[in-house]
Image (cartoon, rainbow, N blue to C red):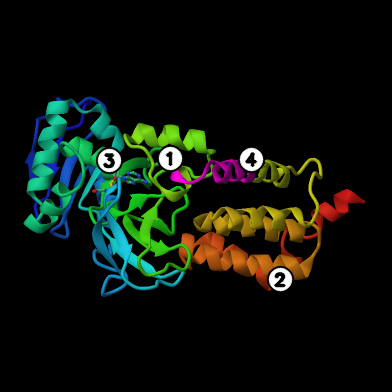
Amino acid sequence: APNPAHILGGRDDEQQEDVCGRDCITGIVAGVIGLNGGISLITSPEYARTIQSYAVDADGGAYPPPFYIEEIDKKGIGLRANRSIAKGEALMARAPTLVAQTDAIVELEVAVRDMMYDVALKRLSKKRRDGFFAQMGRDVQDKITTNSFEFFVPGAEETGSRHLAAYPDIAKFNHDCRPNVHYRITNMTITAVAARDIQQGEELAISYIDIFLPSKKRKERIQNWGFECACALCQGPKNETIASDKRLRRIEKLKTDLNDFKEIKVTAETGAEYAALHEEEGLHAHLGSAYTRAALNFALFGDEERSREYARKAAEELSIEKGPESGDAQAMRALAENPRAHWTWGKRRKLEK
Ligand SMILES: C[S@@+](CC[C@H](N)C(=O)[O-])C[C@H]1O[C@@H](n2cnc3c(N)ncnc32)[C@H](O)[C@@H]1O
């Protein structure tokens, strides 16, 4: 039977309100839930319960903020460093203002969806609502499309459910194809971290797309977002774009070879070359997985010393990228501790014989 669509909760009062009765939506349930006085949800009661159980950090990160807002050439507003920032520094941690189940906003009738947005936004405090409306975009839907981040909420469906979240402060970061800031979403708190050492005066930027794509494909993706990329790589000299595309192709090829376990197409050094290409290309926010591949490849060839060296580097990067307690960072700490005990130990060397 179709589920009722309702507005659940008020600011902190948890009362329910029916929005459109029992049968206006088939298949999905949608509702709006006020949480902690400042987060509105448009989702099913099941996901709402999970989301409500999340601990949130609404106002974390470096204080005073190591950046200021400024008009940036060809990009609208953006953030600029007001001091030098060390790699790994947490710049900002924020809870979302508005969370909407992706399927719900796609499947809902536009009029119902807009009514839900309306109710959800009215429930926010004025400051948080103003923050939402200050984001770039023609209307509520466009603001969500232009500025939101996606995260998954585990649930009955195998993959959980995708949710779009608005983080107006984080939405001030512009895009760069070689970003100096990395973000991660834990439950639904987003944390922006310096992906490398940053100098005073540099613009702070994250990436909106897959930055392993070659220049042409990146351009297409960015066009889908509705703008032309004004980052240094995209606007830089042609020979640099060609050199960058060549490195990206080599990275792709080495990744395929390193992942091949049926046939040995690599040497112990291939992983190190793979990681060095990431460094050269300025793929700072992806060094964790690059060092991980290198560490595992050295372990596969039974090189204890170098496996440890790269596992240590991987653990350091993964602590920034995924958090110090993430499973990936812990796995690399374990490998650094004792490569000989790892399941990969010597496997490629044995194959070679
Ligand atoms: C999430 S907002 C970022 C903040 C935005 N600049 C503003 O003024 O609110 C995304 C929008 O910023 C602009 N933008 C972000 N990165 C850009 C880039 N690398 N080149 C040109 N425009 C960019 C585009 O208009 C894009 O749709």
Amino acid tagged 4: Arg
N-term mark: 4 or 3: 3
In front of the other: 219 or 98: 219
Tell which tag, 4 or 1, sits nearer the viewer.
4
Q: Indicate whether residue 264 is drawn in magenta.
A: no
Quickly name the residue at label 1: 159
Is residue 7 placed above or below 341 in the rendered structure? Answer: above
| Magenta part of the chain | 235-248
Image check: 150 left or right of 32? right
Q: Is mark 3 within 8 Å of ligand 1?
A: yes
Query: On the image, numbered disc 4 is attached to which residue?
Result: 249
Q: Nearer the viewer, mark 4 or mark 3?
A: 4
Question: Would you call the spot at circle 3 few (<14 residues within 10 Å), some (14-19), or many (20 or more)?
Answer: some
Marks 4 and 1, the one that precedes in the sequence: 1
C-beta proximity under 8 Å, tags 4 and 3:
no
Per the image, the residue denoted by label 3 is 146
Asked if residue 30 is positioned above or below residue 75 in the image, the reply reads above
Q: Which residue, given by chain and number where applicable, does mark 2 sit on?
A: 338
Specify which label sits upstream in the sequence, 2 or 1: 1
Mark 2 or 1, closer to the camera: 2
Closer to the camera in the image, 219 or 105:
219
Contact, mark 4 vs mark 1 (Cβ under 8 Å) = no
Ligand 1, by image quadrant, is top left
Q: Is the magenta stretch mostly helix, strand or loop?
A: helix
Q: Are marks 3 and 2 in contact (CB under 8 Å)?
A: no
Q: Is mark 2 within 8 Å of ligand 1?
A: no
Check disc 3 and report its element: helix, strand or loop. helix
Secondary element type, mark 1: loop
Q: Which of marks 1 and 3 is in front?
A: 3
